[in-house]
């Protein structure tokens, strides 16, 4: 996306070496190799879920590579009077740091930001992916899940990084538990009728204005019960898609391009797949970026290949996320218990 | 018992367990980030700031250059999840522009801009987390980023915030304290003892000003030691890496001889 200036000779050199047999890449990878991906969840203490992802960090220097931070925040929205939607909604925003694209002007940066925001938002806020625990009170209150992604550095393949970081942050998101409340004014004559109800509450003397037993649609408001953890995870968190970018250089294609390789590829195909448990994988989004063209008959083969790559990317991301879960939750609990 | 948090209790401790003049712990990371010439991540308590420096380089817009010195351009970006309440701040938000302008004016007298006429130095500030002392964290991080970019400066700039609770001055306030107390940020140049910034946004009694001001000056000296240590350890590591790179391959001292040190004088 951020195309640095590249001379014709350089471009031809990179293309020729990618098409050579065996293909050669500047960092010695094969065509389908990814650079090292580093991931950490829970990096933003004030967010409901967060992740930091780096692709291709230089091992000695401690720097370099594409770096993305993603974080989610939950806000309560009013369905009747506010912008809220029954059942909650998800809004994605991508911000590009000017330090990632020092050669771009402010306007160009805004445009890039906007393009990426649209791509992420359209894919992730699709109804098929919507988690169904974002509602609080039907027709009254719901959660707004805002997902913010920040590109701190771009060393190529930023879209894959964004999707992976988004998936990790959403995986990490905890929705606070809520309990519906209903206010009742007690009439003097009702005292006898409510006697049994009050016994259930265990408050025989005090007439409580709170009645939490009726969770039905009569509830007027909600409260946040004080509980030891931060809430429950988002429903359907295994559905969030991963994206693979196929950089097409006929007759072959390659993955995880660096900036220079990106600049010398005429057309790129973005494929976002979701792999829900116990069902067929879904293709959630597909985009072409660039000015080249692809023959329709190739597309099917590319799709099948893309699904294969996405699957392996998904599997390794899943393993890492489960590791992180253990590191942050189970181990932390054990540590606490020892103390 | 009130529900309000006590700013300074009878035992002389603050709400986070610090003493009056105690700073929160500072973590400085000078490792490289992306393509930046210099960068620094400072974690000061729970405030975290990432500053990257590009330049001196040719300006993007020719019209903005000055013929006799470099232009310093500061852009600031506050991440939406850095505060408790999510709030998207546009890049042209007043508050952000003001902070950026403050940083710019703090560094203009310190950076030797006259060495680079007709060029531009870009400073990009990313606020990752904030919990009080945002401005001083930004200034300290910018100093270190400029140093790691190798841009000549006359001195370090060490900033610290201070406030006063009834009559007792406090250093390095958290958000909780900042909301309740009059506070200011002071940036000092530790070697010369000069002050490049005093920022006061709340009302402060004149009699208390001198106290905090002097205290902040002393704290600046302490910060200077910490920052110098970080720069030194980074430089030592880089030199170490260079030396291991130059070491001869196993037992061959002859290979090393080939790296000739250039001398100033020439022999004919």
Image (cartoon, coloured by chain):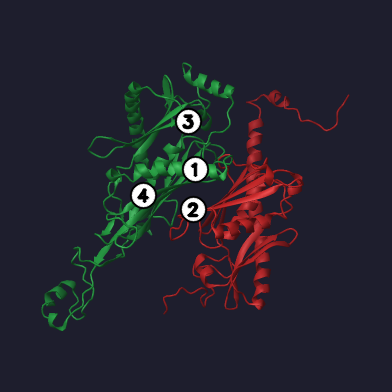
Residue of label 4: A172
Residue sitting nearer the eye, A147 or B132: A147
**Dot 2: within a 10 Å radius of its alpha carbon, few (fewer than 14), some, or many (20 or more) residues?**
many
User: Residue A186: x, y in percent?
Assistant: 18, 79
Nearer to us: label 2 or label 1: 1
**Dot 4: within a 10 Å radius of its alpha carbon, few (fewer than 14), some, or many (20 or more) residues?**
many
Q: Which chain is red?
A: B
Q: Name the residue furthest right.
A: B268
Which chain's residue wears label 3?
A
Is residue A295 left or right of A111 when viewed as pictured?
Answer: left
Nearer to us: label 1 or label 4: 1
Which chain's residue wears label 4?
A
Q: Tell me how far mark 4 sits from mark 3, CA to CA.
A: 28 Å
- The numbered dot on residue A111 is 1
| Residue B251 in view (yes/no) | yes
Task: Tell me the SS state at disc 2.
Answer: loop
Query: Where is residue A304, by image quadrant?
Result: top left
Q: Name the residue furthest bottom.
A: A188
């Amino acid at each position: 996306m951020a195309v640095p200036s590249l001379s014709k000779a350089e471009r031809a050199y990179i293309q020729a070496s990618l098409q050579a047999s065996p293909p050669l890449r500047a960092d010695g990878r094969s065509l389908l190799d990814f650079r090292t991906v580093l991931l950490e969840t829970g990096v933003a203490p004030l967010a409901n879920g967060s992740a930091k992802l780096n692709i291709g960090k230089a091992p000695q220097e401690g720097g370099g590579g594409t770096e993305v931070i993603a974080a989610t925040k939950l806000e309560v929205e009013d369905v009747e009077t506010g912008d809220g939607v029954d059942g909650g909604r998800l809004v994605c925003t991508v911000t590009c740091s000017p330090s990632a694209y020092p050669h771009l002007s402010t306007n160009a940066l805004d445009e890039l930001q906007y393009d990426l925001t649209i791509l992420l938002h359209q894919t992730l806020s699709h109804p098929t992916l919507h988690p169904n625990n974002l509602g609080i009170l039907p027709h009254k209150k719901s959660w707004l899940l805002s997902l913010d992604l920040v590109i701190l550095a771009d060393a190529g393949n930023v879209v894959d990084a964004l999707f992976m970081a988004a998936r990790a942050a959403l995986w990490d998101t905890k929705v606070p538990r809520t309990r519906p409340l209903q206010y009742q004014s007690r009439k003097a004559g009702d005292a006898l009728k409510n006697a049994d109800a009050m016994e259930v509450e265990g408050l025989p003397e005090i007439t409580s204005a709170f009645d939490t037993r009726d969770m039905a649609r009569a509830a007027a408001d909600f409260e946040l019960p004080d509980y030891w953890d931060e809430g429950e995870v988002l429903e359907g968190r295994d559905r969030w898609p991963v994206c693979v970018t196929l950089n097409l250089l006929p007759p072959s294609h390659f993955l995880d391009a660096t900036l220079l390789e990106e600049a010398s590829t005429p057309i790129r195909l973005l494929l976002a797949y979701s792999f829900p448990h116990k069902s067929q994988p879904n293709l959630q989004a597909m985009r072409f970026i660039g000015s080249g063209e692809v023959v329709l008959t190739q597309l099917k083969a590319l799709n099948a290949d893309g699904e294969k790559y996405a699957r392996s990317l998904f599997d390794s991301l899943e393993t890492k996320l489960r590791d992180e879960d253990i590191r942050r939750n189970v181990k932390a609990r054990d540590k606490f218990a020892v103390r | 018992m009130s529900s309000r948090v006590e700013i300074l209790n009878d035992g002389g401790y603050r709400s986070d367990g610090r003493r009056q003049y105690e700073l929160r712990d500072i973590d400085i990371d000078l490792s490289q980030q992306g393509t930046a010439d210099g960068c620094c991540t400072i974690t000061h308590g729970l405030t975290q700031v990432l500053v990257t420096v590009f330049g001196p380089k040719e300006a993007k817009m020719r019209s903005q250059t000055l013929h006799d010195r470099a232009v310093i351009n500061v852009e600031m970006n506050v991440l939406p999840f850095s505060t408790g309440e999510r709030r998207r701040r546009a890049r042209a938000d007043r508050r952000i522009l003001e902070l950026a302008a403050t940083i710019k004016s703090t560094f203009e007298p310190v950076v030797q801009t006259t060495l680079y006429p007709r060029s531009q130095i870009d400073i990009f500030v990313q606020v990752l987390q904030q919990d009080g002392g945002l401005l001083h964290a930004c200034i300290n991080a910018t100093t270190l980023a400029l140093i790691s970019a190798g841009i000549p400066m006359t001195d370090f700039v060490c900033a610290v915030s201070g406030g006063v609770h009834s009559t007792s001055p406090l250093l390095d306030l958290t958000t909780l304290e900042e909301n309740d107390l009059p506070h200011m940020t002071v940036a000092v140049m530790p070697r010369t003892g000069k002050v490049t910034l005093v920022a006061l946004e709340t009302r402060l009694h004149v009699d208390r000003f001198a106290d905090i001001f002097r205290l902040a000056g002393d704290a600046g000296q302490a910060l200077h030691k910490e920052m110098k240590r970080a720069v030194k350890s980074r430089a030592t590591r880089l030199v170490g890496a260079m030396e291991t790179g130059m070491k001869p391959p196993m037992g061959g001292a002859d290979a090393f001889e080939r790296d000739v040190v250039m001398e100033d004088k020439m022999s004919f």
